[in-house]
Amino acid sequence: MARRWFLGQCGLSLGGMALHSLEQPLGTGLHVRPRAKNVIFLFMAGGPSQLELFDYKPKLQQLHGQAVPESFLRGKRFAFMDSFFKGRLKLLGTTRRFARHGERGTWISELLPHTARIADKLTIVRTFATDVPNHVPAKLMLNTGSPRFGRPSMGAWVTYGIGSPSRDLPGFVVLQSGPRGPRGGSLNWASAFLPGRFQGVPFRASGDPILNLRNPRGIDSEAQRAAVDAIGALNRQRFDLTGDGEIATRIAAYEMAFRMQQSAPELIDMRGESDSTFALYGAERDRPSFATNCILARRLVERGVRFVQLYHTNWDHHGGPRENLTTDLERCCRETDRAAAALVVDLERRGLLEDTLVVWGGEFGRTPMGEPRESVGRNHHTESGALWLCGGGIRPGIDYGQTDELGFAPVAERVHVHDLHATLLHLLGIDHKRLTFPFQGRDFRLTDVHGRLLRGLLA
């Protein structure tokens, strides 16, 4: 009796074992007690201006229009260096009114009235820092821990490390809204050198969530099942011969696609959502939007999806066409503020917030100096930006970090991208130093050789 035939007939072939292993994470699993089970990351693509939203600076208002001291600029890098430094840079005070909100009296701008109402549920970080001042590498930095192409995204690292409870939906789902997709595209949710099944899967917000999900006319579910089984058998034979992990990924992709023919239409069918839920989010039925995506994000975590990432563009307010700090910033806030706050409220009402970490932020902040274009906007700034976190083991109701009186740089509790990643992984039960993958002769990790756990953020 041939050994290959025996193992294949007994269901113990390498392909069969590979199929079983595809239900499990490949990483080291949990290292500490998890505080969160899921992550919803609200990525405000373009770099929201913290000085118009969260970081109130009366001194900057007082010095509006004055030249920036040279000591502030020495050795610093900014985007558009040639044009940005054509004239003497001048400080730009905001025209937005700030007020104190919540029991701790945190400063939040008039542009975010709904966020202000949940201030006591949030931890607001005002000292977020990164390494690179341009959009694509900065987005990659926040998503992958590196400004260079070819590194796995944080959602891929998480699902590689601890898997996903959902068998009928991908463990990592991406939703997009706004006038265009984020710069860098699919590199932001790629699996890179991790197995392909851990990459993010973009869903559409209306119609079929994935194109070509429905069977062609004349093909019923039995015929589809037979086709998937036949293709799977051929793939398993090839896997037995080669041991190629990407063939195992392909087998899993066919199986997942077959199961999603049932699960994905049910996910996207929002007829069961009440009118009051749509009103809470400010969403309209059958109209794609950031608000609709927030409802979808909640539905995804309800169904066990581990990591959901929402991108909304365009927060790049330099002062050019469709990029001003007046009507265009107002539009971005109007499109997102109500829905982001509603997501937190809705998760809490349903008992999901305790297990779901929600993060809001962009790839960097904006400069205290103005950038004259068609109007005066703000340039990219790596030294300080703002983000907020909520739920999933985060200590609620605190302001974390402090910048100088002009909002130029942190003076207390700087939070680097690597620190954010280390803390996010910790909340999910993962030690960032132990979640590694061997590639090109060394062990890689999301935080590379950096990162510290921000214990002050933990509940």
Image (tube, helix red, strand yellow):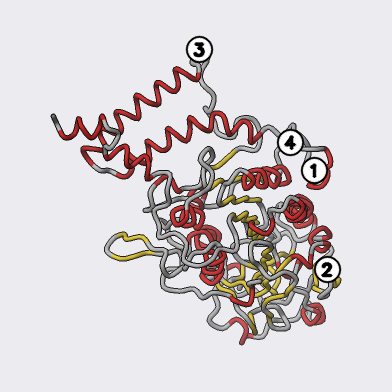
Q: Marks 4 and 3, Cα distance to the nearest angstrom?
A: 31 Å
Tell me the number on the disc at residue 277. Answer: 1
**Residue occupying image coordinates x 42% and y 32%:** 254
Quadrant of the rendering where the C terminus is positioned: bottom right
User: Which one is earlier in the sequence, the residue at label 2 or at label 4?
Assistant: 2
Residue 423 is at least partly visible in this image: yes
Q: Marks 3 and 2, Cα distance to the nearest angstrom?
A: 62 Å
Q: Position of residue 24 (x, y in %)?
A: 42, 48
Report the front residue among 3 and 458: 3
Report the front residue among 59 and 156: 156
Tell me the number on the disc at residue 218. Answer: 3
Where, by quadrant of the figure, is residue 299 drawn? top right
Q: Which element carries disc 1, helix, strand or loop?
A: helix
Report the front residue among 325 and 386: 386
Q: Which element carries disc 3, helix, strand or loop?
A: loop
Q: Which element carries disc 4, helix, strand or loop?
A: loop
Q: Marks 1 and 2, Cα distance to the nearest angstrom?
A: 34 Å
User: Which one is earlier in the sequence, the residue at label 4 or at label 3?
Assistant: 3
Judging by the rendered image, the residue that carries numbered circle 4 is: 287
Residue type (three-letter) at the residue carrying disc 3: Gly
**Structural crowding at the residue carrying mark 1, measured as other residues with C-alpha within 10 Å and reported as few (<14), some (14–19) or many (≥20):** few
* Foreground disc of the pair 3, 2: 3
Residue type (three-letter) at the residue carrying disc 2: Thr
Tell me the number on the disc at residue 95. Answer: 2
**Residue occupying image coordinates x 53% and y 67%:** 426
Tag 1 near tag 4, CB within 8 Å: no
Q: Position of residue 71 (x, y in %)?
A: 61, 87
Q: Position of residue 287 (x, y in %)?
A: 73, 36
Q: Marks 1 and 4, Cα distance to the nearest angstrom?
A: 15 Å
Farthest residue toward the top?
A: 218
**Structural crowding at the residue carrying mark 4, measured as other residues with C-alpha within 10 Å and reported as few (<14), some (14–19) or many (≥20):** few
Farthest residue toward the left?
A: 1
